Amino acid sequence: MTSYRRRAGKQYSRLESIKTRRWGVVKYPRGTKPIVIEARIEGMLNRRPTVHTIVIKEGIGITKEADIPAVIKLLQEKAKNELPADTKAEFSIHFPKTRKKPVEFVAIGGQPLEPRLVVPSGGFDIPEDLREDIKKEWRKHPNRKTATDLEAMAHLMSASAIGPLDTEHTRIYLYLARKYLKSKGWKSFKGSMAFLNEYKSLSENEKRLLQRLKDHIWKEQQKDLAARRKRARQLAKTCPGGKIRSGGKGLGLGRGRGKGPIGVPAMNKGERKR
């Protein structure tokens, strides 16, 4: 496979383009044959299946059919290195303006599963810098049995977009916000931020409410993680190494002749041993 982004030499210094009904304009390096890659990504969110599709139709092409196995290997490695272990990617390599059937295969993610933030659906999106700070807290406390203060703050931040917080949880939120800003280097709160000086501590009841919230977040987080681990084990059993298939005719119909799937040139014996 040739990538325009990676190899911008003399021969591939320009992109050609063709118009298709399905994908619109497809661009590929001059001197190659166009291909379009579709990836249907299946994962889990809130313990429910979630699916989204990615289409790559610009900057890639092949010079010969023997390049197809390299494309497959590259995409399988990309899935393994970038997707979590509970995620499956169903790839289709298409050949625009030809009658060639698409080459289809499955790859699964290989990255360790990490906890995910538990926030109310429909609330504020959590800022990326806060997400990173929460992950740092997770790494500092790998054996924790409850959520962190930052997770509780993020939860309340998101919840405040759905409806007003009650008095106790408003005080807890502002206390946690002040504590977070102090950890980021704020030494004093003046002007429009002076009101935070009133939230230096929590009452005993507010401490109990905060702990209850952190325990709730932790339990929901562990339920989500358990469901994703179960799915990852199922994927490892059903898709070990991925599957390759095609609906075309010709060599490699998957009947045990060792020719490989249609659309992928058969390797000779010497190549198989490598």
Image (cartoon, rainbow, N blue to C red):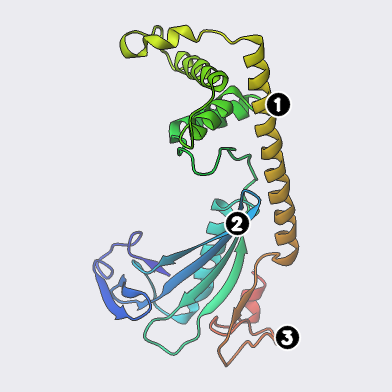
Q: Nearer the viewer, residue 72 or 202?
A: 202
Q: What residue type is labelled 3?
A: Gly
SS type, badge 2: strand
| For the residues bearing labels 3 and 2, Cβ distance under 8 angstroms | no
Q: What residue type is labelled 1?
A: Arg
Instruction: Identify the mark nearer the N-term, 1 or 2.
Output: 2
Q: What residue did someone put label 1 on?
A: 144
Horizontal and vertical percent for residue 258? Answer: 68, 83
Q: What residue did someone put label 2 on?
A: 43
Q: In which quarter of the image is the N terminus?
A: bottom left
Q: Which of 210 and 38 is in front in this view?
A: 210
Q: Which amino acid does label 2 sit on?
A: Gly
Gap between marks 3 and 1 measured at Cα: 51 Å
| For the residues bearing labels 3 and 1, Cβ distance under 8 angstroms | no
For the residues carrying marks 3 and 2, which lies nearer the camera in this image?
Answer: 2
SS type, badge 3: loop
Horizontal and vertical percent for residue 57? Answer: 37, 69
Horizontal and vertical percent for residue 112? Answer: 65, 45
Gap between marks 1 and 2 measured at Cα: 26 Å
Circle number at residue 256: 3
